[in-house]
Image: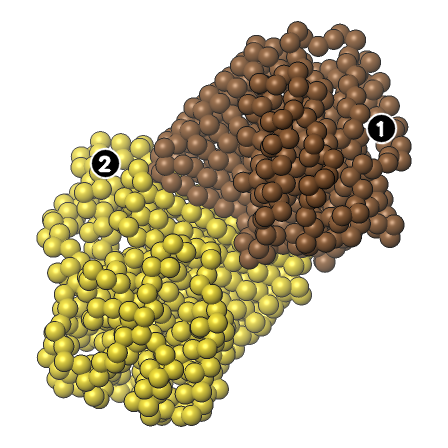
Chain colours: A yellow, B brown
Amino acid sequence: MSESIQRQTRDLQALNTDYASKYGFHDPVDYFHKGAKGLSHKVIEMISRMKKEPKWMAEKRHEALDIFYSKPMPTWGDSELLNEIDFDNIYYFMKPIEQQKDNWDDVPEYIKKTFDRLGIPEAEKNFLGGVSAQYESEVVYHSMREDLEKMGIVFLDMDSGLKKHEELVHEYFGTVIPTADNKFAALNTACWSGGSFIYVPPGIDVKVPLQAYFRINAENMGQFERTLIVADKGSRLHYIEGCTAPVYSTNSLHTAVVELRAHEDAYIRYTTIQNWARNIFNLVTKRASAYKNATIEWVDGNLGSRLTMKYPCVNLLEEGAKGEILSVAFAGIDQHQDAGAKMIHAAPNTSSRITSKSISKDNGRASYRGLVKVHKGAENCKVSVECDALLIGDDARSDTYPTMEVDNDQVSVEHEARVSKVAEEQLFYLTSRGLSEDDARLLIVNGFMEPFTKELPLEYAVELNRLIQLEMEGSIG
Amino acid sequence: MKQNPEFLINEMTPHLHRGPDWLKAMRRSDRLGFNEAELPPRGIHLWRYTDPIRFMMDIDTATDADFTGALDAVVKAEAEHVKEGRLAALVTDRGGRDIDVQISPAGLPQGVIIGSLSDASESNFDLVKEHLYQMINRKSGKFEAMNGALWNDGIFIYVPDNVVIEKPVHLFREAGGENSATFPRLLVIVGRNAEVTLIDEYGGGSPDRNKGISFSNGAVELFGSEDSRTRYVSLQRYAPAMNSYFTHRAKLKQNATMLTIPLVFGGELCKQSFGVELAGAGADSKMYGLLFGSNRQHFDNHTLHHHSAGKSTSDIDFKVVLKDRALSAYTGLIRIDNKARTCEAYQENRNLLLNPGTRAETIPELEILNEDVSCSHGATLGPIDEESIFYLKSRGIERNEAVRMIVGGFVQSTFKLVPEDLKDRLSDFVATRLETI
C-alpha cells in the first residue's frame, strides 16, 4: 500500500503543474459567430434566427427572458457572490464552427487539440457508447456507436434534437423544469444552446455510458446548455458529463438546465464531474421525474468553479419510484460549493436516499442545502439523508441546511450529519505504520470519498482521485 | 383581538414612560426598532412556516388585561410547595403587574435578589443597566423590539458569586384573557460559581377563540458567569386560544454550565426561539425539549447554539409528539466561529406522528467555520409503531392507553438526561399534558 501511496505522491508532484496548464489553457479562436456582450430580446432573436428553430421555441425564449428580468436574484445562499455576476458583461452566444462534425478528423485542429488534451477521444474509444463535445455555445463533435443507433436510441445535441425530433422535444421540453421555476432556469430557457437530447426506446438497455463534455474557452462566456433525457418504459441509461474551462481573471457563467424523465420501470443514472475553472459561476437546475417503479440516480461531483449552486432533484411521482442522490463537493481556496439534493415524494411507497460528502479546505466553504418533502397521501415512504463533512485547515467552513417537510404520518424519515476534521488517531495510526503525514491524510480523504468514487466508471474514479490528490497537495498545516 | 399588519406602537403608550431615564431611552429605541422594521419576509426559513401577522396586535388590544382567576388554584398549590420548602420561592407575574414574591420559610441566601424588574432598574441600577437588552433588543428582530418597548414589569433574579439556591424558584406568569396582549420579561444574572434552578411557567390566555384570541410576547435573558450552574425550565401551557411569541437568550462564560428544558404544550400558535452563546472555554450547554401538539395547534421552535469560544460543548435533544392536525416546525442551528477551536456540538430532533393529518418540518442546520470540531446532528420523523400497539392490545391494553405508553417510552430517553431532583416535577407536567393526548 505504501508503495502505491508513494507512486501517487510522485504523480502528485508531476501534477503540480496545476489546473492552468492541464485544463486552463485557451485557444485563440476565430469564431464563426461571436455576438456582442449583454442580453436583450434582440440577442435572443439572433440566436433563434441562427438556429432556424420553430416559432414555438422562439416564443418560449422571449417569454423566458421577460420572466428572467422580472425575477429578483435569490436572497438565500451566497448572495454576496451571486451579486458579483455582471449580466451585461457576458457573451450569450458564440458559435465556434459552422457545422457540427461526426468525424473526429473533420474537427478543426485547435478544438481537436483541446479535446485531445482533455482525453475525450481516448475515453470514447475505450469505454463510451457515444460522445458529444460542446465548445462554447454549440456541440462541435458528436458521434455514437452504430449498433446503439440501430437500436433506436437517439443521442443528439439539443439543437439537432429539436430539428430531427421536434415532436418529442415539444412534448417534453420544460415539463420537468418550467421556465418560471427560478431566475436561472428562465435565463437558460431564454438563451439555451447545445446540451444533449437523449431518447431511449422502451425496453432498451444502453449498456455503455453516453458522455457529453462541456468546454468553455472564451473569457466572459456564458454557456447555457440544455439537456433533456427521456427513458421510455423499462429502458436503462447511464449518462456522464464533464466540464472544464480556461483560467481567466474575469468570470464566466455556466447556467444549465437538465431535465430527466424516467417512465415506468426505467432507470437513469446521471453522473457529473464538474471541474470548471475557479472563475466560473456554475448555477444549474437539474431535476428528474420518476414514474411507476422507475429509478433515478444522480451522481454529482463538484470540484471546480468559483460558486456552484446546484441541487439535483427527483420528483417521485408514482408508486414504487426510487431516487438516489450521491453528491460530493470539494471546496478549496476561495471556492463556495453550495450543493445539495431534493427529493419530492408525491406518491405512496416511494423511497429515496441522499448521501452527501463534502471536503472544505483552506478558506473553502462547502454547504449542503437540501429538501425532503413528503406530500399528503404519499404513505409508506422511506427517506434517508446522510451528510458527512470533512474540514481541513483553520479557515475551512462547512454548512448544513437540510429541510424536511412531512405532511403525513405513515413515513419514516431519517437525517444525519457529521462534521469533523481528519481524526488524529487515524493519522497517528497511519504515520506509525511509516506513511508520511501527507500520504496518510490523502489516504484518509480518499477513504472518505470512496462511497462516491466507487460509483464512477473506472477512468473517472482514477481521474477524480488524481484531482483530489492535486487539491490535497501540501495540505499539512 | 384584531391582527393589524400595520400596527405601530404609539408614542403615548404608557409603558414607554416607565422606569429611569436610561430605561425609557431603551424602550423608545425598541419602539422605533419595531415601528421601522418590516414584517419578517416569509422567504427566509425561520418564517417559512408561520405568518408573522399573527403576532401583530391592534391599537385597541388591551395591554393591561383583567384576570379571570382561572389559575388561582395552581398558584395556591405552588404556594403550598413554598411553605413546605419544596420550592425556594414562588414569583407570580400577572400580565406584568403586581410582581409578587413568596419565599420559603428557610429564606434565601444573603445577597440573592428575586423580584420586580422595574424596582431593580431603580435600586440595582448598574447591574440591570449592564445586562438588560444586551442579548434581546431591536437588532434581534421586530417582535423582540416589540417586547423591549412594551414590557410592563418583569422579573429580576440575581444570584451573587458562590451562592447556591438549592430548591427551584418557580416563576408563574399569567397572561390576560381574550383580546389582550402581555409582554413578560425576565433577566437572570448568575454570579461566579453560583447555582440556581428556575421553572419559568407561562399560563393563562383566552380559552376560546370564538370569544377572541389573546397574545403574548416574552423575552428572557440569562447570564451565566464563570463556573456558574444554571438550570432553566420553560413550561409553556397557555390556554387554547393564545398566540405566543417567545425569545430566550443566554450567554455562558468560562466553565459555566446551563441546562435548558423547553416544555412546549399549550396555545393555538406558538413561536419560540431558545439560544445559548458559549462565550468562554469549558462552557457547556444542554437543551432537552419536549413538545406535545394536538388539535390544530401550530408550533414553530428554533434552537441556537453559538460557539464563540473554543473548548465549549453543547447538546440538543428536541422531541416532538403530534396528534390530530397539529403542526410542528423545528429549526435548529449550531454555529461554530472560526476562532472557537476544539468544540463539540450535537443536535437531535425526533418527531413521533400519532395519526395522519399531522405535519412535522425539521431543519437542523450546521455552520462550522473551523476544522477543529466534532459535530453532528440527526433528525427523524415517523409514525407510531403499529406492531407495538398490536402487541400491547393483544395483552388487553386498549389503544389509547397503548399509545400513551409508547409516547411515554419515546420521551423516557429525555427523562434519563434530567437531574434526579427535577424528574418528579417534570414528569408531573408531562403526565398532565399526556392525559389529553
Give the camera-side residue of A99 and A416: A99
Q: Is residue B196 above or below residue A16?
A: above
Q: Is residue A147 rendered to the left or right of residue A339? A: left
Look at the picture and state if A404 lies above or below B123.
below
Side (left or right) of A428 relative to B319: left
| Residue appearing at x 19%, y 85% in the figure | A32
- Residue at 69 percent across and 35 percent down: it is B16
**SS of the residue under disc 1:** helix
Residue B74: which numbered mark, if any? 1
- Residue at 57 percent across and 18 percent down: it is B126
Q: Is residue A261 visible?
A: no
Residue sitting at x 59%, y 52% = B38
- Whether label 2 touches label 1, CB < 8 Å: no
What amino acid type is highlighted by mark number 2? Gly
Q: Are marks 2 and 1 on the same chain?
A: no
Q: Position of residue B124 (x, y in %)?
A: 63, 16
Chain letter for mark 2: A
| Cα distance between the residues tagged 2 and 1 | 61 Å
- At label 1, the amino acid type is Val
Residue A100 % position (x, y): 23, 86
Label 2 residue SS: loop
Is residue B253 visible in the rendered image? The answer is yes
- Please state which of residues B79 and A89 is positioned toward the viewer in this rendering: A89
Disc 2 vs disc 1: which is toward the camera?
Answer: 1
Residue matched to label 2: A477
Q: Tell me the crowding category of disc 1: few under 14, some 14 to 19, or many 20 or more residues within 10 angstroms, Cα based.
A: few
**Image quarter in which the C terminus of chain A is found:** top left
> What crowding class fits label 2: few (fewer than 14 Cα within 10 Å), some (14-19), or many (20 or more)?
few
